[in-house]
Image (spheres, grey):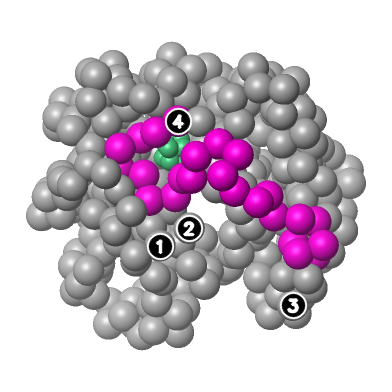
Amino acid sequence: MSSLITYSPAYTLVPTYECFNRCSYCNFRTDPRNDTWLSLENAKRRLISLQQKGVWEILILSGEVHPNSPRRQRWFQHIYDLCELALELGFFPHTNAGPLFYEEMKQLKQVNVSMGLMLEQITPKLLETVHKNAPSKQPEIRLQQLAYAGELKIPFTTGILLGIGETEADWWESLSAIAQQHQTYQHIQEVILQPHRLGSKQSWKKDGFNLKEFPKLIQKAREILPSDIAIQIPPNLIPDSQFLLTCIKAGVTDLGGIGIIDEVNPDYPHLHVDSLQKILNEEGWKLKPRLPIYPQYYHWLSPRLKSRISYIIDE
Ligand code: SF4
């Protein structure tokens, strides 16, 4: 195994926390029309304060406005404008805003170096439980998004959410579905294995993932997924540093976006990169920053986006 473990130096902008879905494990959402959207002026102030601080990725992470809402176009344009702003200020946008129309995804490709959407789990059983009030979580919609991204040649990040009521067999089925998409389009750059951890805002009060299962799951994921897909885990959701090392040893190659706050899991702040490096030193691993697009996909970028990353490629 390589002695390098990568991470993305990242900052998250949230255009809006409002979301028309109600996943019962969510610690992010507010009700539709119950949130003041992040203004471009506010976003600009924040981004300017991050310049020259080593941040590369701007994750544009949004709650969802219903596809048929009269506000959908304004929401989409706002996301596009935030990406454009981040690009102009020297950052690399990566948008994750829930399922998008094909045309929306096509437009966002112009201002994103990569995009993402968690598959979560493909079992429809969850539509009767945690996803009962979350129409966007229909497995076929999520799979269609992966296919859209492949057709559009968008380097894509996806993953599975663990401990939301699925079975072990569901893990392998979901990972196999991701592997199949990649075999068709060759576009999945990384897969996040994300344990659900209980948060203070969620209505579903179970912490359903047994972390002891994690190393086994990581090993099997490495067997199921093609070898050119990176395996990512979020280190802030692993409570113990020795256990984090055990998980990495099982086949993890990336620790994802490390920033000030994990907006999806606000109860679990990230360790500073220096502290993570110290933990990794124990096993001789070196933490290396990476862009939100993996090198094998640079040739999929438009000339404009390619020129933005050229100074980092040349380093
Ligand atoms: S998990 Fe995502 S889709 Fe579900 S309610 Fe929260 S923000 Fe919306």
Question: Residue 42 location in percent, x, y?
Answer: 76, 64
For label 3, the SS is helix
Query: In which quarter of the view is residue 129 placed?
Result: top left
Residue kind at label 3, given as amino acid type:
Ser
Q: Residues under labels 1 and 4: Cα distance?
A: 19 Å
Q: Residue at x 60, y 64 (%)?
A: 11
Q: Is mark 4 within 8 Å of ligand 1?
A: yes
- Asked if the residue at tag 1 contacts the one at tag 2, i.e. Cβ–Cβ closer than 8 Å, the answer is yes
Query: Which of the marked residues, 1 or 3, is nearer the chain's N terminus?
Result: 3
Measured as percent of width and height from the top left, residue 134 is found at 40, 26
- Secondary structure under badge 4? loop
Q: Is residue 249 visible?
A: no
Q: Residue at x 34, y 77 (%)?
A: 280
**Along the viewing direction, whichever of 43 and 103 lies nearer the viewer:** 43
Q: CA distance from mark 1 to mark 3?
A: 22 Å
Question: In the structure shown, which secondary structural element does the residue marked by tag 1 occupy?
Answer: loop
Mark sitting on residue 266 = 1
Check disc 3 and report the residue beneath it.
Answer: 49
